[in-house]
Image: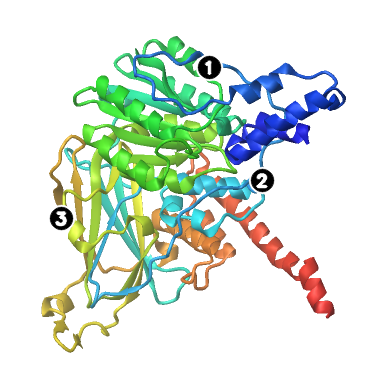
């Protein structure tokens, strides 16, 4: 029994031990010592094990930004020898429920309004599940994040504009007779050496839950990649939090890379998770070193498992919303599995004018922090909203695929106080609509008891499918600018369409299969693979080839579930009866 309790403490599972269990552990140790059984149970006791029981950090007041890290937080706990935790072992992962968008009749709902989303965490997290031999939970699958993980061949914007605009209309592969509309945005790509100076604060979770190979060790390696991109004019501070928050490295110039790397190498995991204190201190440090017209940003790296201080979703959201008023943006990087809190980190990024990525390998860290350094670290447009007005003479009904967490009311579009998504340097944003053509059916009127809705004659004569409006703000401004574009109702056969809509359709269809969507129609893995292979393109970095491999594995996992469900012990017993 003593060995079990000691091992629980060694594994830093203090979050799962209640106060009663901790007291029971101490009493049990004392009982063994008094009875003499301790000598038999622990022939040569390791004093470090008992020291661990005494050194579990307790919550403490937040340290001042100028204070050094408390010595107790730098103590290295004895190394732990154990197998990596699987996605199901001690699984307390949390995901917000996703209620898929339904088809809406244009005659009743002519406007579709939503905030853009450049987050990619869902794709990487889904990949992690599949690579571990599991199908992901349905709510872990956010289709827009799967689609937006990939780059697309959209043109660079005109001079002076933050993004360009692209549309394509083709047949929907999973539903005969329906159409698929692609809307693509391409953010202006700013070379790294032309980016404004950066004031970065690395906010790093060093609590006990981070003491696993795919958490803090991977995190440190990832941040070293980011440090390699820093220039002389950039500055970095490092704030950590466990049982308390502390400043490990004051704001330091990008030319002092050895000093920054040494601070990263000094990080050790242990204790509880005072995330609220860490966020407050990180924003305080960012504000104290604020660079006017620069890139002021907190980079939060964690598994999201906050349990001390402000830890509820509502508290954390209010805290982040308050801090973003200082002009400091937020990037959230997720690590680990088992206790991963996707729902919380997604909310933090959304409320903090930021972006959210999940890092499961060093190669993914390279993609996010080197290949997409400008997009991850530099915002070129904030509060970007999109509103599509469909022509009822051309469209009977529509469904926005994904973006369920980004939906806005029509009146939110022109409200500059309403928060929306951010677009980074070089980022692409892709949105897909599934459309039911009108075929003349919607060109009449709808008679209600108290009003009549009629379609204008000009709409019937128009060759336009829809009108799209974009609103965005420059990073340092509070007043939005609006752009308007028209979409022609010209349909292309999918096999004749470009690789952009072909590959995006493949990814969206895969997402619907993973979610077992009620709108998946005739979707199949074979069709997804056919579309993806046809639209793979040059694929210089191999991301699309990896997607094809993931679809192949998903098909095997899905097939295995179907095959074994018939011969499971429960079903065999039922059949025998």
Give the residue at x 23% y 22%: 291
Q: Is residue 183 left or right of residue 177?
A: left
Q: CA distance from mark 1 to mark 3?
A: 51 Å
First in sequence: mark 1 vs mark 3: 1
- Please tell me the numbered disc located at residue 59: none
User: Do we see residue 2 in this rendering?
Assistant: yes
Q: Which residue is mark 2?
A: 89
Label 1 crowd (10 A; few <14 / some 14-19 / many >=20): few
Quadrant showing the C terminus: bottom right
Name the mark nearer the viewer: 1 or 3: 1
First in sequence: mark 1 vs mark 2: 1
Name the mark nearer the viewer: 1 or 2: 1
Residue 175 screen position, x and y as percent: 45, 73
The kind of secondary structure element at disc 3 is loop
Q: Which residue is mark 3?
A: 414
Residue 450 screen position, x and y as percent: 14, 86
Q: CA distance from mark 2 to mark 3?
A: 47 Å
Residue 508 screen position, x and y as percent: 46, 59
Asked whether the residues under the numbered discs 1 and 2 touch, taking CB atoms below 8 Å apart as contact, a structural biologist would say: no
Q: Which residue is mark 1?
A: 72
Label 3 crowd (10 A; few <14 / some 14-19 / many >=20): some
Determine the residue located farthest toward the front in the rendered image: 34
The kind of secondary structure element at disc 1 is helix
The kind of secondary structure element at disc 2 is loop
Asked whether the residues under the numbered discs 1 and 3 touch, taking CB atoms below 8 Å apart as contact, a structural biologist would say: no
Name the mark nearer the viewer: 2 or 3: 2
562 or 416, which lies in front? Answer: 416
User: Relative to 399, is 95 above or below?
Assistant: above
User: Relative to 406, is 29 above or below?
Assistant: above
First in sequence: mark 2 vs mark 3: 2
């Amino acid at each position: 029994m003593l060995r079990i309790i000691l091992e629980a403490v060694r594994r830093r599972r203090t979050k799962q031990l209640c106060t009663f269990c901790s007291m029971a552990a101490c009493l049990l140790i004392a009982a063994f010592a008094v009875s003499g059984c301790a000598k038999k149970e622990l022939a040569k006791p390791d004093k470090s094990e008992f020291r661990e029981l005494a050194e579990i950090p307790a919550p403490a007041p937040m340290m001042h930004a100028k204070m050094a890290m408390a010595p107790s937080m730098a103590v290295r706990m004895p190394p732990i020898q154990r197998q990596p935790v699987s996605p199901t072992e001690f699984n307390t992962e949390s995901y917000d429920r996703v209620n898929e968008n339904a088809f809406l009749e244009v005659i009743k709902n002519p406007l579709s309004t939503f905030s853009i989303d450049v987050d990619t965490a869902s794709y990487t997290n889904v990949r992690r599940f599949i690579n571990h031999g599991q199908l992901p939970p349905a709510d872990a699958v956010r289709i827009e994040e799967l689609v937006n993980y990939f780059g697309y061949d959209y043109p660079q914007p005109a001079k002076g504009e933050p993004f360009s605009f692209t549309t394509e209309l083709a047949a929907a592969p999973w539903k005969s007779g329906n159409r698929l509309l692609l809307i693509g945005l391409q953010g202006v790509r700013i070379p790294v050496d032309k980016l404004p100076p950066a004031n970065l604060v690395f906010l790093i979770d060093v609590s006990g839950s981070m003491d696993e190979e795919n958490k803090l060790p991977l995190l440190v390696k990832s941040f070293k990649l980011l440090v390699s991109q820093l220039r002389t004019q950039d500055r970095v501070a490092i704030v950590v939090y466990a049982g308390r928050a502390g400043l490990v490295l004051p704001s330091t110039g990008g030319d002092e890379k050895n000093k920054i790397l040494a601070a990263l190498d000094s990080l050790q995991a242990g204790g509880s998770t005072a995330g609220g204190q860490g966020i407050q201190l990180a924003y305080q440090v960012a504000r104290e070193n604020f660079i006017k017209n620069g890139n002021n940003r907190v980079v939060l790296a964690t598994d999201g498992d906050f349990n001390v201080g402000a830890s509820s979703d509502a508290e954390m959201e209010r805290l982040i919303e308050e801090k973003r008023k200082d002009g400091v943006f937020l990037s959230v990087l997720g690590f680990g599995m088992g206790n991963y809190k996707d729902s919380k980190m997604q909310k933090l990024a959304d409320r903090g004018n930021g972006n959210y990525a999940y890092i499961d390998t060093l190669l993914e860290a390279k993609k996010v922090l080197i290949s997409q350094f400008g997009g991850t670290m530099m915002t070129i447009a904030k509060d970007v909203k999109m509103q599509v007005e469909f022509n009822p003479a051309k469209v009977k009904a529509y469904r926005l695929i994904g973006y369920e967490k980004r939906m806005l009311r029509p009146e939110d579009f022109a409200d500059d106080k309403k928060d929306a998504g951010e677009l980074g340097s070089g980022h692409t944003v892709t949105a897909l609509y599934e459309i039911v053509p009108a075929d003349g059916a919607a060109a009449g009127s709808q008679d209600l008891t108290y009003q009549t809705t009629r379609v204008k004659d000009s709409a019937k004569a128009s060759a336009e499918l829809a009108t799209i409006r974009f609103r965005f703000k420059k990073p340092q401004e509070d007043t939005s600018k609006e752009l308007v574009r028209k979409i022609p109702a010209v349909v292309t056969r999918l096999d004749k369409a470009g690789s952009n809509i072909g590959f995006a359709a493949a990814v969206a269809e895969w997402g619907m299969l993973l979610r077992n969507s009620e709108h998946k129609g005739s979707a199949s893995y074979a069709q997804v693979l056919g579309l993806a292979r046809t639209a793979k393109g040059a694929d210089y970095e191999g991301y699309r080839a990896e997607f094809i491999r993931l679809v192949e594995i998903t098909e095997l996992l899905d097939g295995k579930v179907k095959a074994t469900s018939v011969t499971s012990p429960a079903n065999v017993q039922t059949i025998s009866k």
